[in-house]
């Protein structure tokens, strides 16, 4: 009489018959993200703890304008300015500047072209007899 058990009788009484407690002899792994909050919960906690929930937000980037002070504008006007009537025209957009700040003094009649100006810069340019032109 043979004492060796038949294959069908092996693992009887062991509940899962050697196939594990999660999928019991069904496919290798779930397709896509199925079961991450159910039968793969331990895997989720261990390997993908950030799988569920929201995580922070995207901070909008600040844009820093390339700025120049009035005192430097006067120096650039001597070098790059063009004479137009009684004004010396200084196009700061062509020189790569976007904003004019109000530090310094203006002694020339400047016609300054830029995208943005501070209030002080406008006051000082106009007080010296100059003109402000906003480029688009």
Image: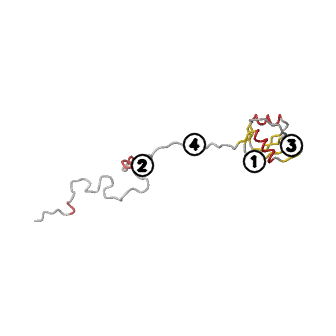
Rendered image: mark on residue 59: 4
**Up-down: is 3 above or below 34?**
below
Q: Earlier in the sequence, mark 4 or mark 3?
A: 4
Q: Earlier in the sequence, mark 1 or mark 3?
A: 3
Q: Secondary structure at mark 1?
A: loop
Q: Earlier in the sequence, mark 1 or mark 4?
A: 4
Q: Are marks 1 and 3 in contact (CB under 8 Å)?
A: no
Which residue has dot 2 on it? 48
> Which residue is pictured at 25% across the width and 53% down the height?
15
Question: Whole-Å distance between the Cαs marked 4 and 3?
Answer: 44 Å
- Return the residue found at the far left: 1
**What is the number of callouts on the image?**
4
Side of 86 relative to 27 (left or right): right
Q: Quadrant of the N terminus?
A: bottom left
Question: Whole-Å distance between the Cαs marked 1 and 2?
Answer: 50 Å
Question: Whole-Å distance between the Cαs marked 3 and 2?
Answer: 67 Å
> Of the residues tagged 1 and 4, which is closer to the observer?
1
- Return the residue found at the far bottom: 1
Q: Nearer the viewer, residue 106 or 7?
A: 106
> Which residue is pictured at 76% across the width and 36% down the height?
121
Image location (x, y in percent) of residue 107:
83, 37
Q: Nearer the viewer, residue 84 or 37?
A: 84
Which residue has dot 1 on it? 93
Q: Secondary structure at mark 3?
A: strand
> Within 10 Å of the Cα at label 3, are there few (<14), some (14-19), or many (20+) other Cα atoms?
some
> Of the residues tagged 1 and 2, which is closer to the observer?
1
> Which residue is pictured at 71% across the width and 42% down the height?
67
Which residue has dot 3 on it? 87
> Of the residues tagged 1 and 3, which is closer to the observer?
3
Rendered image: mark on residue 8: none
> Within 10 Å of the Cα at label 4, are there few (<14), some (14-19), or many (20+) other Cα atoms?
few
Q: Secondary structure at mark 4?
A: loop
């Amino acid at each position: 009489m043979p004492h060796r058990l038949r294959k069908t009788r092996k693992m009887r009484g062991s509940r899962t018959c050697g196939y594990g407690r999660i999928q019991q002899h069904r496919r290798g792994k779930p397709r896509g993200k199925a079961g991450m909050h159910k039968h793969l919960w331990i895997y989720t906690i261990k390997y993908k703890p950030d799988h569920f929930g929201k995580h922070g937000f995207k901070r909008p980037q600040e844009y820093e304008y390339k700025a120049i002070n009035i005192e430097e504008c006067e120096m650039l006007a001597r070098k790059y300015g063009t004479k137009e009537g009684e004004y010396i025209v200084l196009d700061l957009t062509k020189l790569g500047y976007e904003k004019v700040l109000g530090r310094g003094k203006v002694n020339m009649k400047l016609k300054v072209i830029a995208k943005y100006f501070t209030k002080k810069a406008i006051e000082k340019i106009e007080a010296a007899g100059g003109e402000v032109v906003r480029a688009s």
